[in-house]
Image (spheres, coloured by chain):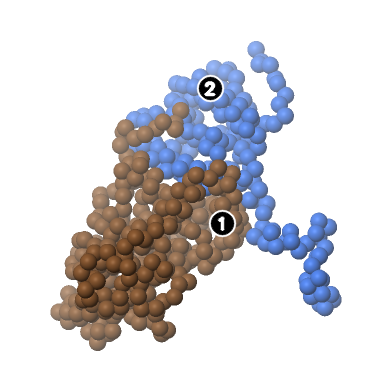
Amino acid sequence: MHGEHIKHDFEPKIVAFVCTWCTYAGADLAGTSRMQYPPNVRVLKFPCTGRIDPVFILRAFQKGADGVLVSGCHPGDCHYMAGNFHARRRFAAFRALLDFVGVDLNRLQFSWVSAAEGGKWVDVVTELTERVRAMGPMPEFKELEHEEQWSTFAEATVDKSGAINTPELKEAYDSIG
Amino acid sequence: MNAKANKNHVTSIEPAYYQAITEAIRKEAAKILKDETVVGVVGYLPGRRKGTASPALVTTVEEAEKLIFSPACVNNLSVYLTKAKKGVLKQGKVGIVAKGCDMRALAGLMTESQLQREDLFIIGVVCPGVYGFGVERTGTLTDANIARKCRECTVHMPEGADVAAGTHTELADLTPEEAQELARIEAMPQAERWAFWKEHFSRCIRCMACRQVCPFCYCEQCLCDKNRPQAVENSPRPAGNMAWHLVRAMHLAGRCGGCAECERVCPMDIPLNLLNRRMAQELKELYDFEAGLTPVDKGPLNEYKENDDQSFIK
């Protein structure tokens, strides 16, 4: 009954932003139908894809996600009539922006998964997880998170032990003491 | 008008050309103030130093006689109608001196119902260009000291203005520096693009000048100032900077009129207009939208078509 559990070197963190009416129900269907899919995905439920702000995606990447999935109702099926149509345009623009600043778009997946498509949910999640696993961890945003504005300056003036290593600064430091 | 200005394309634009515009603006501003068409005119007054100008709201005919237009009139005045001088619109119709790029901002603000066309008297300027930053501000405007945005200007004629001051004149053979830079970045490998923007954004000091000067950043409370929950870190650290500039570009997508004020005011010289240009280019490709001189019903990200491209969605 249980699938073979394979141990991987790298387990990617995937954040899924889903709409409550379609994809969340679709994922629920996959669960109640006992379908197996990678446990790497963390599902966050929203009222509608139209509620999913690009900021959420940035924040997910910053806080450690290696991949992001955004999923909602098929066009025309939106509970709020047009939320996903608006989201579609917004995300098309956002993708272009991320590409322009140098983010790999393979880490960002958009999909339409209806409440009846438990199988499609499993496919989408599995494919994204495996793709991101093959790509490895996403370093860009996480590195930014740990950097400070003066890091280049600090690198030049402070050695690994934290001691000040330029003569001018040393002199200034000594004069204080 | 000198003989050169009669031709459309010239190698330098003499102060006389701007003087003629100045005269026209003064005449028009004095007239509309006198017959009480407007309660005030937003325009430019001479700055304290030579070769500068400062934005001002003039309310009397005497003051209107001091208005100027010169290549130093770089500011986009439409920002005064959504922010600093917002209150003046309540008192009645307002006159505003607008270059082509400023008029695109006005049109965008009308699209978003922030301004009403009947509340404005637009004194359009047939603008041949303004000074760039860090250049010699001598009398003539040439290839050497023209602003980057003006090199690819498509709105020399302020069509749709109530009156237009000046005759059509452009500088000849300008290099499209911005388009070249955009093409250069797009041609970079992905990792290099990231490094390019990371370097630029990590210099950001989060002074928010880009937001203050933008006519479209008129939200009473900015998303990026909010905490609990905090969307974008608001201290000047690389992570928050990257997020702020991406959010800014995203919020301006499909709205930005391309006045490049954000780039002009940036104390750290971050090429912000490249982001705006890239987004504008994308929306042109995808939805055939271009910021124009006349208001539209809805911006490209506020409307949709059922058959929009969804090749990127599974």
- Say which residue appears at 27% left-offset and 71% top-offset: B97
- Give the label, 1 or 2, closer to the camera: 1
- Say which residue appears at 53% left-offset and 22% top-offset: A123
The reply to whether residue B261 is in sight is: yes
Residue type marked 2: Asp
Q: Quadrant of residue B126?
A: bottom left
Is B38 rendered above or below residue B102?
A: below
- Identify the colour of chain B in the image: brown
Tell me where residue B260 appears, x and y as whole percent.
40, 61
Is B269 rendered above or below residue A5?
A: below
Is B37 rendered above or below residue B223?
A: below
Q: Disc 2 is attached to a residue of which chain?
A: A
- Say which residue appears at 45% left-offset and 24% top-offset: A115
**Left or right for A174, reference B200:** right
**Left or right for B99, reference A8:** left
The local secondary structure at tag 2 comes to: helix
Q: CA distance from mark 1 to mark 2?
A: 37 Å
Say which chain is blue.
A
Q: Are marks 1 and 2 on the same chain?
A: no
**Left or right for A49, reference B189:** left
Foreground: A149 or B230? A149
State the residue position of label 2. A123
- Say which residue appears at 29% left-offset and 48% top-offset: B298
Tell me where residue B48 appears, x and y as whole percent.
41, 85
Tell me where residue B170 appears, x and y as whole percent.
28, 65
Q: Quadrant of residue B60?
A: bottom left
Which part of the image, by quadrant, shows the N terminus of chain B?
A: bottom left
Q: Quadrant of residue A174?
A: bottom right
Residue type marked 1: Phe
State the residue position of label 1. B201
Residue at the far bottom: name it: B62
Q: Residues within 10 Å of mark 1 (few under 14, many from 20)?
A: many
